[in-house]
Amino acid sequence: MKLTPGEKIVVLNEALGAAYPNPKSELCYGSAFQLLVATILAAQATDKQVNIITRELFRFAPDAESMSRMELEEVRSLVSSINYCNNKAKNILEVSRILVERFHGEVPGTREELESLPGVGRKTANVVLSNAFGLPVMPVDTHVHRVSNRIGLVRTEKVEQTEKELMNIIPEAWVLPFHHYLLLHGRYTCKAKKPDCAHCAVSSICDYTGKN
């Protein structure tokens, strides 16, 4: 019998929960500010790349106050190995100065305030709200979007639609870890070009037509 998306959520929660117990972000950070900066850098880049860069960046500027005092060229030089380094350096510096001027150096805990910051879109805001503030929101990146559609949890073309539909079928108490389940499954098993269906814990309930 074919399972409904809601029924698949129950199976996924058990199977992926066993595969990825106590999941968390693979970005390295020590505060909400550091997570925000790391997430801005992570667009079109891997967490591994970001962690290498932030290790040095946060040694110079671990918080908004110290980052806000840096010159643009200093920040740019520290993030120069990342994609779109010029824009990201500019945004990080502007965000830091705004946090100092408007939020006493602290990262705000609402979506509206986060999305008012330069370089912070819905996904970045969701990452911070979820991981730093423990709010039940669903950050949707390419991994989450791909896995959700392949398995048959949703039938969507845009990440915004995926987020909305996932939030409708995932119990609120499961939302926080579920983002990580889908992301990690997409990163290590259900890869974009060569999904490892033979070693997939949820292959039996997956709708992906190309599975082997």
Image (cartoon, grey):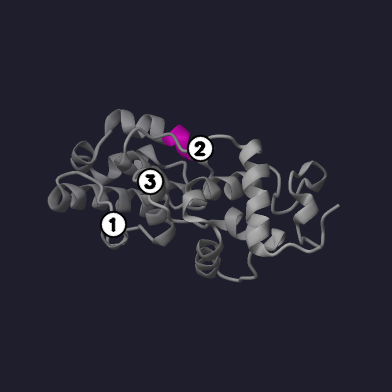
Amino acid bearing label 3: Gly
**Which of the pair 115/131 is nearer the observer?**
131
Q: Mark 1 and mark 2: span between their CA atoms?
A: 23 Å
**What residue is pinned by disc 3?**
134
**Which of the pair 194/41 is nearer the observer?**
194
Amino acid bearing label 1: Thr
| Residue 209 left/right relative to 9 | right
Residue under the image location 52 percent in, 47 percent down: 45
Q: Nearer the viewer, mark 1 or mark 2?
A: 1
The secondary element bearing badge 1 is classed as: loop
Residue under the image location 60 percent in, 44 percent down: 184
**What residue is pinned by disc 1?**
110
Q: Mark 1 and mark 3: span between their CA atoms?
A: 12 Å
Query: Does the CB distance between marks 1 and 3 fall below 8 Å?
Result: no
| Residue 36 left/right relative to 160 | left
Residue under the image location 51 percent in, 63 percent down: 163
Could you say where residue 129 lies in the image, as x and y percent from the top left?
36, 51
Give the mark, 1 or 2, whose residue is nearer the N terminus. Answer: 2
Q: Nearer the viewer, mark 2 or mark 3?
A: 3
- Count neighbours of disc 1 (C-alpha within 10 A) and say few if under 14, some if 14 to 19, many if 20 or more: some
Q: Is residue 18 above or below residue 43?
A: above
Q: Is residue 59 above or below residue 131?
A: above
The span picked out in magenta is: 49-53
Residue 134 magenta: no
**What residue is pinned by disc 2?**
26
